[in-house]
């Protein structure tokens, strides 16, 4: 018999009006023609075109002039190839050039799902029993490109949830490429990414054991210029694309959490940033850092990555390494166990695995933890976010895929000191799609990337067939009792 789940009346829908201004480029030849056209305009014509554009789009974007100026700078080499001194460009002409290489992208126009919920670092000005949380979502726009967006919500003493409306502006972060790379790990990840081994061997000879981005970029460009084969040149480009997967991003302090979008940056994630699983991680000294594992997708290959922040303004991003850092569904435990980091994974696409590591970004020796056992999960089982610590063990919300590709949510309980020991697993799903939830962008799917416990109730944010997201709740004492009584189901 299934547990009684309370569906919350709150639903969070995508907002197609939420757009970002992206750089647009369709090749050197066409770009050069556009530049020549703009340079042929008089100053009066330039002003008459750009002035109404600025008035119109300043209502849709924060600091549109800064965006257009930045996009103009991205085509500096094209402008100078037209025999124009970039530094002598007049302000309005610079803005107009930038506008021709800018387009709006609606980040939430197609789907909005797979939420993950953690404590807001700011818990000030609340009354007893209230809790402020940050919810991340996977937002999908044109071309099925996924990004990470955020909302802030308030949970009251009665477990009611109020999601704060999103702002009108969206900001992309400033990208900071100041990473220092470990040569061994970098070249191993490059080999895993199918970059030509001969090229990697050549690069490896020239690099120190640790190197920075500027050193790598100069060396790659110098080596690339010596190549005549376009295919070889592409392999050097791939190395630079891989280096872009190590970076930091920083949002302006005058943005609300709902204004911030983490959009694909590197070529290795150009088709999307998928299913961020955020966790509030408590270090040995008691300090807190927020981590998120997510999947970067380039259209053919996936790359597990790690994101970390303390304030949701500044983020550090790097790929995950090792035999266990494969496929999707990586979820970090919220603290170390016996002095080691611990991670859930699903390296074979079907089963749950457990891994330990001394280093946060290197994961090897995955051990199978769970396999599909019940009819509603016969196709595959996976985690729905990081395990949650309770007095009785680690609570793991799972997803299972059954007949007709129907996704349901389940729950398992594991030993606190040895999470390889499964204490109990629900025989029946915890949450299944009802008639109001089964239709959408991807039918018959419920999915979550991270829940939390508030005042004795487990609150699960979940995506409804990928078209929007909602919440469900269950009393922890009831759930734990059911899990402990289900131990006879575990062989």
Image (cartoon, rainbow, N blue to C red):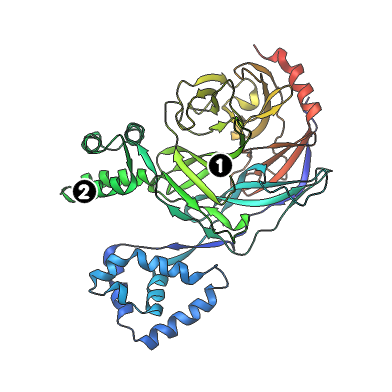
Residue behind mark 1: 276
Horizontal placement of 271 versus 199: left or right? right
Mark 1 crowdedness (10 Å alpha carbons): few <14, some 14-19, many ≥20? many
Q: Is residue 214 left or right of residue 307?
A: left
Question: Where's the N terminus, which quadrant?
Answer: top right
Spot the residue most to the front: 285
Q: Nearer the viewer, residue 297 or 89?
A: 89
Q: Which mark is residue 224?
A: 2
Where on the picture, by quarter, is residue 116?
Answer: top right
What x and y, as percent, mark residue 259?
A: 59, 58
Q: Return the x and y of residue 318 as percentages of the image width and height.
A: 44, 40
The reply to whether dot 2 and dot 1 touch (C-beta < 8 Å) is: no
Corner quadrant of residue 106? bottom right
Any part of residue 351 in sight: no
Q: Secondary structure at mark 1?
A: strand
Which quarter shows the C terminus? top right
- The one nearer the camera, 361 or 144, is 361
Q: Give the camera-side residue of 201 and 280.
A: 280
Residue displayed at 61% across by 47% down = 136
């Amino acid at each position: 018999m299934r547990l009684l789940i309370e569906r919350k009346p709150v639903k969070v829908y995508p907002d197609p009006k939420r757009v970002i201004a992206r750089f647009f480029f369709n090749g050197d030849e066409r770009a050069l023609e556009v530049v020549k056209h703009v340079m042929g305009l008089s100053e009066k014509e330039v002003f008459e075109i750009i002035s109404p554009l600025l008035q119109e789009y300043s209502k849709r974007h924060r600091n549109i002039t800064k965006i257009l100026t930045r996009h103009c700078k991205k085509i500096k080499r094209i402008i100078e190839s037209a025999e124009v001194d970039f530094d002598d460009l007049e302000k309005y002409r610079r803005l107009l050039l930038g506008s021709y290489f800018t387009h709006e992208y609606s980040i939430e126009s197609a789907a909005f799902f797979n939420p993950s919920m953690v404590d807001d670092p700011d818990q000030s000005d609340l009354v007893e029993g209230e809790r402020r949380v940050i919810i991340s979502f996977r937002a999908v726009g044109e071309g099925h490109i996924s990004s990470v967006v955020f909302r802030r919500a308030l949970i009251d003493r009665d477990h009611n949830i109020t999601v704060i409306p999103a702002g009108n502006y969206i900001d992309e972060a400033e990208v900071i490429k100041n990473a220092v790379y470990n040569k061994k790990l970098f070249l191993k990840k490059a080999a895993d990414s199918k970059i030509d081994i001969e090229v990697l061997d050549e690069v490896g000879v020239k690099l120190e054991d640790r190197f920075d981005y500027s050193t790598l970029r100069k060396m790659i460009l110098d080596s690339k210029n010596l190549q005549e084969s376009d295919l070889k040149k592409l392999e050097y480009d791939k190395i630079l694309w891989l280096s872009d997967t190590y970076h930091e991003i920083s949002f302006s302090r005058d943005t609300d959490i709902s204004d911030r979008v983490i959009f694909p940056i590197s070529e290795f994630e150009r088709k999307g940033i998928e299913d961020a699983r955020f966790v509030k991680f408590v270090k040995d000294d008691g300090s807190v850092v927020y981590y998120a594992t997510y999947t970067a997708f380039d259209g053919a290959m996936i790359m597990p990555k790690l994101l970390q922040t303390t304030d949701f303004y500044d983020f550090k991003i790097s790929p995950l390494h090792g035999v266990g850092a494969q496929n999707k569904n990586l979820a970090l435990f919220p603290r170390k166990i016996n002095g080691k980091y611990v991670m859930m994974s699903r390296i074979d696409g079907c089963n749950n695995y457990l891994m330990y590591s001394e280093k946060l970004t290197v994961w090897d020796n995955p051990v199978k933890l769970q396999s599909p056992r019940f009819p509603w999960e016969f196709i595959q089982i996976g985690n729905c976010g990081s395990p949650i610590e309770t007095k009785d063990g680690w609570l793991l919300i799972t997803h299972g895929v059954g007949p007709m590709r129907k996704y349901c949510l389940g729950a398992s309980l594991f030993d606190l000191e040895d999470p390889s020991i499964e204490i109990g697993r629900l025989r029946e799903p915890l949450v299944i799609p009802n008639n109001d939830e089964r239709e959408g962008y991807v039918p018959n799917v419920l999915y979550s990337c991270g829940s939390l416990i508030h005042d004795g109730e487990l609150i699960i944010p979940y995506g409804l067939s990928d078209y929007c997201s909602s919440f469900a709740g269950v009393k922890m004492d009831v759930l734990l009792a059911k899990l402990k009584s289900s131990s006879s189901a575990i062989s």
